[in-house]
Amino acid sequence: MRGYSVWNYSPYRPLNQIEQTTLPYICRLAPKETTVELEWLDCGCVGRHYVNYRVYSSSENFTRLELTDRIATIEGLVPESDYELYVEREDGSGRSDTRLFRTGAAVGTVVNYLHPEDESYSFSGRYLCSPSLVMLPSGGLLAAMDVFAGQSPQNLTLLFRSDDGGLHWRYVTELFPCFWGKLFCHRGELYMLATSTEYGSLIIGKSQDEGQTWSAPMTILPGGGCTGQGPHKAPMPVIEANGRLYTAIDYGSWKSGGHANGLLSIATEADLLVTDNWLCTSFLPFDENWEGAAIGKGGGLEGNAVVGPDGEIYNVLRYQMANCVPAYGKAVVLKGDRTNPEAPLTFQWFAEFNGGSNSKFDLLYDKRSAVYWAIVSEVVDETKPTQRNVLSLAMSRDLRTFSIVKRLLDYRHEDADAVGFQYVSFLIDGDDILYLSRTAINQAHNMHDSNYITFHRIERFRQYLDS
């Protein structure tokens, strides 16, 4: 066994399962109400292959279909039912893991699906998380998601690509170790900024072929791992301003009592893979005595680097306030120093923002409308301040007051503990917004532990200005 000098695998398997990398591999599932689309590969055989499927845990015989392409659709399935399937070689020399899926009406376009009882990625986790969306220099779309579960390693990221504006998605590769990853392009090159695991080292790598292959990642900041304190980051925006790239970063852990907040930056002309080129502010802990703070123990998390109306650099953060009074409705706004990238952030104000608390949100400035746009988990039932079953489009002109202008997915009629649309990653494409959602629906483990990553488009989003 040779050492491995790059970041990508197709597929990744732990070293004690390395023989599985030459067996058939189901790399993508996309179930709908009565169908499922599957994508597969086999690095160890070019002969004929078959897919076998049946209702999950039933005694009935498997139905067997020949696979004539790397992508296949099974039709005529029973709605709202669990199925199992596997791909095998005609000669019987190898078969894939048994994969699980559940039929049901989906939202948007399914990029990928993972059944909560599917053990295929148990070396990393059981649920899909951390969606990140980027438009490639060629115009294609690249989507990333990691595989997580509490008390699990949480270190695998899956990549998928669309070349038709998000209508269809195809498997690309996998990154290991990679968690909480943010895809972004800079000077025509593709990067992934991530951690090695929950609270692991902050790392960065580059692809020169739009995500097919990746350089070995470089460490920017050391981590503490899931049992200690370390860098924390969701796939938050990376922006360019004042000759630098900026992104928000946190430090701490839930177990240690919360997170302090900072900004990470680098000169735009610097080599992003030279870790000494990166600068980070010191980390500012939350202060319950800040003017306007809710009563109770709260904190800031998962901030958005953004240029304010005054040209200064700000970090607009989710305000974790579910155990406070009030329990929702604000975001934390901190300010950086654009002349000194290592200077500590300073508290500025709490924004009035339904959707700015208790869940991650993406925030982007749109020059054409001169407005800040966000996609958020809106609270429509004040008795459920952590609900994520209503996804909405919000806007602000001043980073002080945000208003909801369009409800995108309104499932308030569904159990808020079972359904969630959350952790959106979005980009502006001309007149439209394109976004990925971490979606929990159709008997997900719960609203937090999602089983889908779904793609969506908001057409002519500026029509909702001040609506």
Image (tube, rainbow, N blue to C red):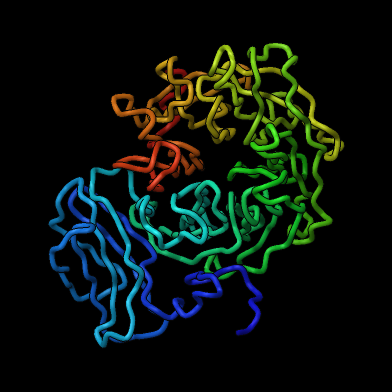
Residue at position x 29%, y 73% from top? 87
Percent position of residue 431, x then y: 44, 38
- Residue 42 to residue 197: above or below: below
Number of marks? 0
Quarter-of-image position of residue 445: top left
Residue at position x 61%, y 65% from top? 207
**Quadrant (top left/top right/bottom left/bottom right) for the N terminus:** bottom right
- Residue 343 to residue 172: above or below: above
**Quadrant (top left/top right/bottom left/bottom right) for the C terminus:** top left
Quarter-of-image position of residue 84: bottom left
- Residue 369 to residue 398: above or below: below
In depth, the one of 305 and 127 nearer the eye is 127
Residue at position x 62%, y 54% from top? 197
Query: With 187 as the anchor, is 59 left or right in this view?
Result: left
Percent position of residue 19, x then y: 47, 80
In depth, the one of 202 and 397 nearer the eye is 202
- Residue 371 to residue 212: above or below: above
Percent position of residue 253, x then y: 67, 39
Query: With 25 as the anchor, is 301 left or right in this view?
Result: right
Quarter-of-image position of residue 400: top right
Query: With 457 as the anchor, is 320 left or right in this view?
Result: right
Percent position of residue 350, x then y: 66, 18
In depth, the one of 337 and 153 nearer the eye is 153
